[in-house]
Image: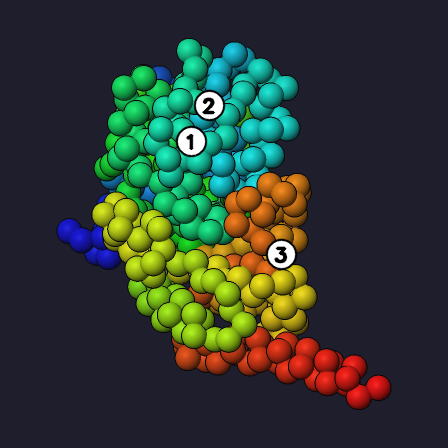
Amino acid sequence: MRFGTRLLHNGNEVDPHTGAASIPLYQASTYHQFDLDHPGAFDYARSGNPTRQALEQTIAALEEGERGLAFASGMAAISTVFLLFSSGDHLVVSKDLYGGTFRMLTEVLPRLGIEATFVDTTDLTQVETAIRPHTRALYVETPSNPTLKVTDLAGVAAIAKQYGLLTIVDNTFMTPYLQQPLTLGADIVVHSATKFISGHSDVVSGLVAVKDPVLGDRLAGLQNAFGAVLGVNDSWLTLRGLKTLKARLDASSASAARLARGLKEIPGIERVYYTGLPEHEGHELQNAQAKGHGAVLSFDTGSADRAKAVCDHVRLPIVAVSLGAVESILSYPAKMSHAAMPREERLQRGVTDGLLRLSVGLEDPDDLLNDLEQAIRARRLVSVNTEWRASIV
Ligand SMILES: *Cc1c(COP(=O)(O)O)cnc(C)c1O
C-alpha cells in the first residue's frame, strides 16, 4: 500500500475493544489487573497507554520501523535518545542544528561528560574526520534550518556502519511522507511532531522510531525511566493530525514551490532558499533521497530593517516561531531560532539580518504571494519616500 493509504489504514486506526473509528482517549493512569498471575497489557500509564500506543505503533509503521515511542515534546524525544550515551561518549553532529538540540548538547550533556563536535554534515569528509575513539553516534538534520542544506543520509549511515556508530536523524522538516531515514540506513529517527505531523499549531509532541527491536526496548526503558511521555489528549491530537499529513503536505509543498519561484521575481528579495529550486546546491541530492521538497523556504530581504518591515506588513502569515501548520508561519531566525548564536557564527551559516523563514500553510498560494509582495513593496515605498522627504528639506 502507498503512504497515503497507510496513513489511514496501518492497523492502529480502529479501537480493538469497541470498534470506535477514532482511537478513544483512554484517560486513565492505572489499570485493574484481573489476574495477578497473568498481568494485562497495561499496568501504569507512564509505561503504556492505549491511546499513546496507537500513535507509537503508527509512527513505527510510517517510518518503516519496528518500534515507535511518543514523548511530551520533540526535545523530550531527543533528550531521551541522548540518554543512550554515557560519560566519556562523543557525538558528531550537524552544525546547522535546531536551537534546543544545540542547547542540550552544549549546556546540559557536557556536564554529564558527553561531548559533541559540530561539523558541516553536507561534507562527508568532515563527518569522518571528526570521529574519535569514543564517538558513539552521528546526529543529522536534513534539510537544515533555515538555509535548507541537504545531508546525504545514506552516506552518513554508511560511515556510521563502518565505525560501528549509531545514526540519528531529526526528520521533523520532511516527515515520513517525504523522507524515510530508516530505509536509508539510519538507526533512530526523531521528530518534533509539534510541526507537520500534528499540523495545526495546537499541540507540543515528540516521536521516535527505530528499526532494531533491541534498541527499541532500550529506548522504551529510557522513556519509562525518564518519564517524559506524551499525554493522552496530545496523543489523540497527534493521531488526528497525522491522518491528513499527505493532503496537507501535498498542498503546502506545491504552494511553497510556487512561492519560491514567485519570490525570486520580487524586487527587494536578494536570495531564495528552497531545495525545489534547481539552483539550490542540495537540489539533486534532495531529489535522490526524498520524495519532495517540503513546505519550508527562506528568503533574504537584505537588511534587518527590511525583514522587520515585512513582518510588520504581512496580513496572512502569523509572525511566530514554529512551523508545519495549516496556517502559514513567518519567522525571523536572527531574533528567534538563532538569537542566542554569536552574530559572526550566525552570518557564517547564512542566517543574515535580513533572512526570513516561511512555513507555507494551506492558504491560496496566490494570496500568500500577493501578501508578501505588498509587504515588501510597502517597505520599499516608505524608504523611497523617506529619502524624498530628506531631499526637500
Ligand atoms: C521544533 C523542533 C524541535 C523541538 O521540538 P519541540 O516539539 O519544540 O520540543 C526539534 N527539531 C526540529 C527540527 C524542530 O523544528
Depth check: give the residue in front, 56 or 285. Answer: 285
Residue 183 in the image: above or below residue 243: above
Left or right of 274 in this view: 113: right
Q: Mark 1 or mark 3, which is nearer the start of the sequence?
A: 1
User: Split into 4 quadrants, where in the image is the C terminus?
Assistant: bottom right
Q: CA distance from mark 3 to mark 2?
A: 30 Å
Q: Position of residue 273 (x, y in %)?
A: 43, 58
Identity of the residue furthest to the bottom in this view: 392
* Amino acid type, callout 2: Leu
Query: Residue 353, which numbered label?
Result: 3
The x and y percentages for residue 147 are 46, 51
Q: Earlier in the sequence, mark 3 or mark 2?
A: 2
Question: Do residues under tags 2 and 1 come within 8 Å of each other at their CB atoms?
Answer: yes
Task: Using the image as rendered, state which of residue 64 and residue 296 is in the foreground.
Answer: 296
Establish if 239 lies above or below 140.
below
In the displayed image of the protein, which residue is found farthest to the left?
A: 1
Q: Residue at x 59, y 60 (%)?
A: 354
The amino acid type of the residue labelled 3 equals Asp
Beta carbon of the mark 3 residue lies under 8 A of ligand 1: no
Q: Is residue 141 left or right of residue 59?
A: right
Kindly identify which residue carries mark 1: 139
Q: Compute the Cα span from label 2 to label 1.
A: 7 Å
What is the CA distance from the residue labelled 3 to the residue labelled 1?
28 Å
Q: Which mark is residue 91?
A: 2
Q: Can residue 354 be seen by looking at this rendering?
A: yes
Quarter-wise, where is residue 70 in the image? Answer: top left
Badge 2 crowding class, 10 Å Cα cut-off, few under 14, some 14 to 19, many 20 or more, is: many
